Image: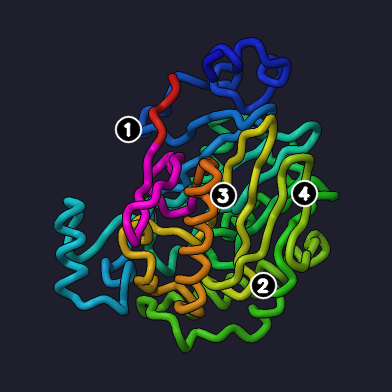
Amino acid sequence: MSQAEMRKSSPISQQADISPRSMPGAGKPARDELVPSRYALRVGEIDVLVISDGVLPLPTEMLAHNAEPAVRAAWLDDMFLPPDALDWPLNAVVVRSGEQTILLDAGLGLDPDLNLPRAGQLVRRLEAAGIDLATVTDVVLTHLHMDHIGGLLVDGVRDRIRPDLRIHVAAAEVKFWEAPDFSHTAMPPGFPDALRATAKRFTNEYRSHLRPFGEEQEVAPGVAARRTGGHTPGHSVVRVSSGGEGLTFAGDAVFAVGFDQPDWHNGFEHDPEEAARVRIRLLRELAASGDLLIATHLPFPSVGRVAVEGNAFRWVPVFWDY
């Protein structure tokens, strides 16, 4: 049975859920939306919806600040990418397991001081998909960088969430942001201050909702968060599993360049050496299991699998299911 047939016959998809045929406005993109911004799939009996939070323009040096400029430039040229600045995709995920609706990361929100008008689209795109913030029972944060928590700081959002909303994040991550270390990062000017201020504001405003976990936490049936560290000390990934199928939301453990060059250091990594080890270990796991992969900064909708390619890896995007 195809995924499309499964959606039609599924009792979950016959409810007011996140499958594309039942979402309000499905098939009717907004006039200012020139490209798709949501993609639905199923993992066994669990509904998954990828939402684009927009794009984040950054210098290409951020992809690999430990690589020789000529080598980095050659990789960009081989990928038909611009040499100086690149739009990084921003993806978040909604998961529905049983009675729980879980948001995996919350997007950038709005930070006018950084002049990023094409990012921070998550809240309005959730609305366009027919998802009421009041129905979200849980949020899992891969880490506390502002492009993963800022959507919860948008004006009016706090008033719309459930009073019993649970926000799951690694305890090590919360601890790190009490006095964050940026000595091994390579960020554009302004970003460290913005990251520090956003994390502080977030933990202050949402402290009563936080549910810190140690190494692993089952959030819902078939939905588990696991701390990996590396990118930040408490960086985590989320695995969705049901009916013998699996999908991992990798947050910032994997970037587009990380398949060909898993040892290259991303400018936002607080421990680049450990981040590379985490990346390689995770990609090997995914290649062995055949699980689907979604990551924050892979091209939307970011759904694919991992294959081993010699000493590196290869990302194999799925064919879209219409």
Q: Which is closer to the viewer, label 1 or label 2? A: 2
What separation in Å lies between label 1 and label 4 (alpha carbons)?
35 Å
Q: Earlier in the sequence, mark 1 or mark 4?
A: 1
Q: Is residue 31 visible?
A: yes
Instruction: Residue under label 4, please give it.
Output: 219
Magenta span:
295-317
What residue type is disc 3 on? Phe
**Which amino acid, by three-letter code, is at mark 1?**
Leu
| Disc 4/disc 2 C-alpha distance (Å) | 17 Å
Seen at 64% across and 48% down, the residue is 239
Q: Residues within 10 Å of mark 3 (few under 14, many from 20)?
A: many
Secondary structure of residue under mark 4: strand
Give the CA distance from mark 1 to mark 2.
Answer: 37 Å
Point out residue 30 in the picture as x, y percentages from the top left corner: 42, 28
Mark 1 or 3, closer to the camera: 3
Q: Nearer the viewer, residue 312 or 170?
A: 312
**Residue type, mark 4 in image:** Val
Marks 1,4: beta carbons within 8 A: no
Label 2 sits on a secondary structure element that is: helix
Labels 3 and 2: the sequence-earlier one: 2
Percent position (x, y) of residue 296? 48, 53
Q: In this rendering, does residue 257 appear at all? A: no
Q: Residues within 10 Å of mark 4 (few under 14, many from 20)?
A: some
Residue labelled with disc 3? 249
Instruction: List the residue tagged with mark 2.
Output: 173
Question: What distance separates the C-alpha of mark 1 from that of mark 3?
Answer: 26 Å
Q: Amino acid at mark 2?
A: Glu
Horizontal and vertical percent for residue 188? 35, 76
Q: Nearer the viewer, residue 313 or 206?
A: 313
Q: Which residue is mark 1?
A: 34
- Which numbered disc flags the more N-terminal residue, 4 or 2? 2
As drawn, 305 above or below 226: above
